[in-house]
Image: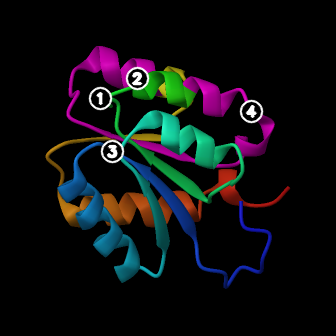
Amino acid sequence: MSDSPESAIPRVVVIDDDHEILKLIVMLLRRIGAEAATFADGQTAMAYLSAETPDLIVLDLMLPDVDGFEILSQVRTQPQFDRVPVLILSAKANSESIRQGLELGADGYITKPYIANTLIDKVRHMLHSERTKQP
């Protein structure tokens, strides 16, 4: 998480193998003053996350190399991510996937296709949630 003051630019990691979705999310995040680090596969994202702690993670479940649930599980076992919210953004709209994501520690779940304003509202809320506030 950013160790800088409240006025710091929020850092969001976005993991999705659809490059068009990545571009759209980056554009939406810029609109609210956040910066994004984007990854199209899980291994590259996890390598980045081993060295960086963002303010929010937006995670697709269906990735080419590592299942999004596995990434979520790994993130939730590492103490540096205790206060980092995770938002799942996935085409998996069935109740079992939603339940599993939330049980593994996701803080929110939005299904694709999504409405841009819904995503932005959720991101804003999560960036200001209790989980992201310092103890």
Q: Which residue is mark 1?
A: 62
Kindly give the residue lying farthest to the right in the view shown. Answer: 135
Amino acid type, residue under disc 3 in the picture: Asp
Instruction: Please report whichever mark, 4 or 2, sits nearer to the chain's N-terminal start.
Output: 2
- Answer with left or right where residue 104 lies relative to residue 68: right
Amino acid type, residue under disc 2 in the picture: Asp
Asked if disc 1 and disc 4 are in contact, CB closer than 8 Å, the reply is no
Which secondary structure, mark 3?
loop
Q: Which residue is mark 3?
A: 16
Disc 4 to disc 2, how far (Cα)? 18 Å
- Answer with left or right where residue 81 lies relative to residue 18: right
Give the number of the disc on residue 67. Answer: 2
The residue lying at 58 percent from left, 47 percent from top is 85
Instruction: Please report whichever mark, 3 or 2, sits nearer to the chain's N-terminal start.
Output: 3
Q: Which residues are magenta?
A: 73-101
Disc 1 to disc 4, how far (Cα)? 22 Å
- Answer with left or right where residue 18 lies relative to residue 86: left
Instruction: Please report whichever mark, 1 or 2, sits nearer to the chain's N-terminal start.
Output: 1
Amino acid type, residue under disc 4 in the picture: Gln
Which secondary structure, mark 2?
loop
Disc 3 to disc 4, how far (Cα)? 21 Å
The quarter of the picture where residue 41 lies is top left
Q: Is residue 109 above or below residue 3?
A: above
Q: Quadrant of the C terminus?
A: bottom right
